[in-house]
Image: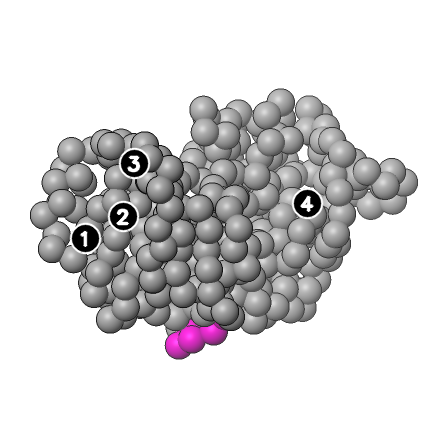
Amino acid sequence: MMDTTYDVIILGAGAAGLSAGIYASRAKLNTLILNEGAVGGQMVLTHEIANYPGVEITNGYALANIMKKQAKHFGCKIKSGVKISNYDFSGDTKVVNLEDGRSFQAKSVILTPGGRPRNLNIPGEDQFKGTGISYCATCDGDFFTDKEVVVVGGGNSALEEAVSLTKYATKVTIVHQFDEFQAFKHAVVEAQANPKIHFIMESELKEFLGNGKLNSVQIRHLPTGKISEMKTDGTFIFIGYLPNTENLKEVVELNNRGEIIVDGEMKTNVPGVFAAGDCIVKKYRQVTTAVADGTIAALSVSDYLRSKN
């Protein structure tokens, strides 16, 4: 049953979605956030946030809760734990259908499904996320000052982040499954020239080990199958990124990596449909950039709705 037509429905309650909810509802737009997972998205996986401007130190869960309270304070409605079955964005009124039979409609939509780092999917990875395993050197590098870390990957992100980590760590060991890197030449040269960076090629991580926090990793040498164990204080995984857009392929235009294509106002190719956060085409994925994207999307929705009146 659809008893209300909202001004905007926001699909996702991560940093981008909550920020869009704050700005849209504060602009007196009738705003609904529909969220499939936990409120906060990737934020809640961050054990400690020390680089959010104006906030000396916090954690992702606390920051997400503050954002949620702010959005609700301005009148934003939030429904979590829902399962979306399909969308109909073809007309002026956008419709979102849930698996439980409920439907919601709005004059506009902001897509903020977020994304996720590509996982290794090996034993111990889920256990030590946030207590030794990270997917963001910019976010967590400072926590490994004067410690030894492992970096997994062989592309541009892996090598560039490995160099970045040498500002903090005493030793950085790159583990890569091939005998050559897939990064640009300048990134390879810079990493190889850094005395703090060491390389283990043609190898892959087999398991993360520890007691309460990560203590070591098992490494398999692929040509021989030999398994060794290396002590480490932390592991950074840079093997790619996956936007949560699998169910949006026939809805809005995506690039070949599954990222939503938007313009500077966060508009998609579908009139009245906007997108923000980790799901869109962008280089940097931080809480602050997601907040900015969500803000822009909400302001753009306000302009869009005014132009329709």
Give the label, 4 or 2, closer to the camera: 2
- Dot 4 or dot 2, earlier in sequence: 4
Closer to the camera, 53 or 152?
Answer: 152
Disc 4 + disc 2, Cβ < 8 Å: no
> Mark 1 falls on what kind of element?
strand
**Alpha carbon distance from label 1 to label 3:** 16 Å
Residue 32: percent from left, percent from top:
71, 51
Disc 1 + disc 2, Cβ < 8 Å: yes
Amino acid type shown at disc 2: Ile
- Dot 1 or dot 2, earlier in sequence: 2
Locate residue 132: give its quadrant.
Answer: bottom left
Query: For mark 2, what is the residue?
Result: 174
**Alpha carbon distance from label 4 to label 3:** 47 Å
Query: For mark 1, what is the residue?
Result: 197
The residue range painted magenta reads: 55-59
> Mark 2 falls on what kind of element?
strand
**Alpha carbon distance from label 4 to label 2:** 43 Å
